[in-house]
Amino acid sequence: MVSSSFTTTTTAASRTITMIFLLFLFTPTLVTSECELLKYDTNLLEFPLNLEYFEAEYFLYGSIGKGLDSIEPNLAAGGPPPVGAKQANLSHIVKDIITQFAYQEIGHLRAIKKVVDGFARPLLNLSAESFATVMNDAFGKPLSPPFDPYANDINYLISCYVIPYVGLTGYVGANPKLQSPISRKLVAGLLGVESGQDAVIRSVLYERAKEKVVPYDISVAEFTNKISELRNKLGNTSLKDEGLKVPIDIGAEKKIQGNVLAGDKDSLAYGRSPREILRIVYGTGKEHVPGGFYPNGGNGALAKRYLKLGKN
Ligand SMILES: *[C@@H]1O[C@H](CO)[C@@H](O)[C@H](O)[C@H]1NC(C)=O
Ligand SMILES: *[C@@H]1O[C@H](CO)[C@@H](O)[C@H](O)[C@H]1NC(C)=O
Ligand SMILES: *[C@@H]1O[C@H](CO)[C@@H](O)[C@H](O)[C@H]1NC(C)=O
């Protein structure tokens, strides 16, 4: 008994010593390698700030008529204020939902900037004309009168269909490229809530899918289909975007045309690269030609690199 307990004690003691030794040996390396992994991920983690700034400003202005400069000025990091953003004419429930999204986006900006330095808010063109241009491009002809995203619930929700989904495909695309568990945790957390926002926007629109968007003789579902078609075209890849009503062979399990959520043949979310995202949000189809919502292009190393390539 005595001897066995003695052995246990010495074993435990030597184990502790070994542990301390191992910790001493590996701790500095672990810390360095975690830093190195994060450094590798930095560009991919910073890039989505471009879209998060868009969403924060668009949701803040649309719901409460004020932007980051009034609510969390530090997060703008001295970037220029957005152009043309204003409060939308929303019902109580839609205003309530969009206000929640707006505050969620503030959290997203803060969460990303806790992990990486990030960059300043890029110049954003959130004017009604900016959205009207997207709709004209989507339909391949000018809508008359021009589409006004701020006019009412349905127009605002359709305008919300335009960008947040692109951000979500960006997180799906980035995740497999990330090295650090810290980055992957951040991106999974962002992806979860962004997908939730997309699902809310899509379900509210889905309920009204057959309604005509006044004064056009065009249904809500048709608007979403055209916007998705435009994004597919601008992104210049295979199918990654689907409206609320799809041909049956694109629906879930090729069994249904209703498409409240977009997904591939196994109903997995589509992923997009930063380059594809820039082609879409610039509205130019070219990652080196800025425009649309980003008159001067995006910020951060990735967007800047593509812009520079365009200047050569
Ligand atoms: C915003 O977009 C509209 C429509 O494309 C354009 O007329 C306007 O000049 C743009 N504003 C800025 C500051 O880029
Ligand atoms: C605001 O939206 C409501 C309901 O959609 C609509 O009846 C009203 O005309 C709109 N007001 C303005 C100023 O556009
Ligand atoms: C990408 O764009 C090129 C040039 O416009 C076109 O030829 C090609 O078919 C496009 N690829 C896809 C997958 O859409």
Image (cartoon, helix red, strand yellow):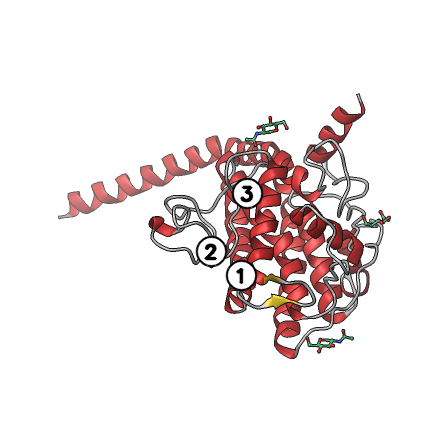
Question: Badges 1 and 3: C-beta atoms under 8 Å apart?
Answer: no
- Along the line of sight, which residue is nearer the eye, 215 or 1? 215
Q: Which mark is residue 202?
A: 1
Q: CA distance from mark 1 to mark 2?
A: 7 Å
Of tags 3 and 2, which is closer to the observer? 2
Asked which secondary structure carries label 2, the reply is loop
Q: CA distance from mark 3 to mark 2?
A: 26 Å
Q: Is residue 300 left or right of residue 311?
A: left
Q: Mark 1 or mark 3, which has the lower sequence index?
A: 3
- Amino acid residing under circle 2: Leu
User: Which residue corresponds to the image point at 71% horizontal and 50% vertical from the top-left?
Assistant: 136
- Residue tagged 2: 261
- Amino acid residing under circle 1: Arg
Q: Mark 1 or mark 2, which has the lower sequence index?
A: 1
Neighbours of disc 3 within 10 Å: few (<14), some (14-19), many (20+): many
Asked which secondary structure carries label 1, the reply is helix
Residue 57 in the image: state x and y as whole percent.
74, 58
Which quarter of the rendering shows the C terminus? Answer: top right
Of tags 1 and 3, which is closer to the observer? 1
- Along the line of sight, which residue is nearer the eye, 106 or 134? 134
Indicate whether 37 appears above or below 120.
above
Question: Can I make out residue 231 in this image?
Answer: yes
- Residue tagged 3: 183
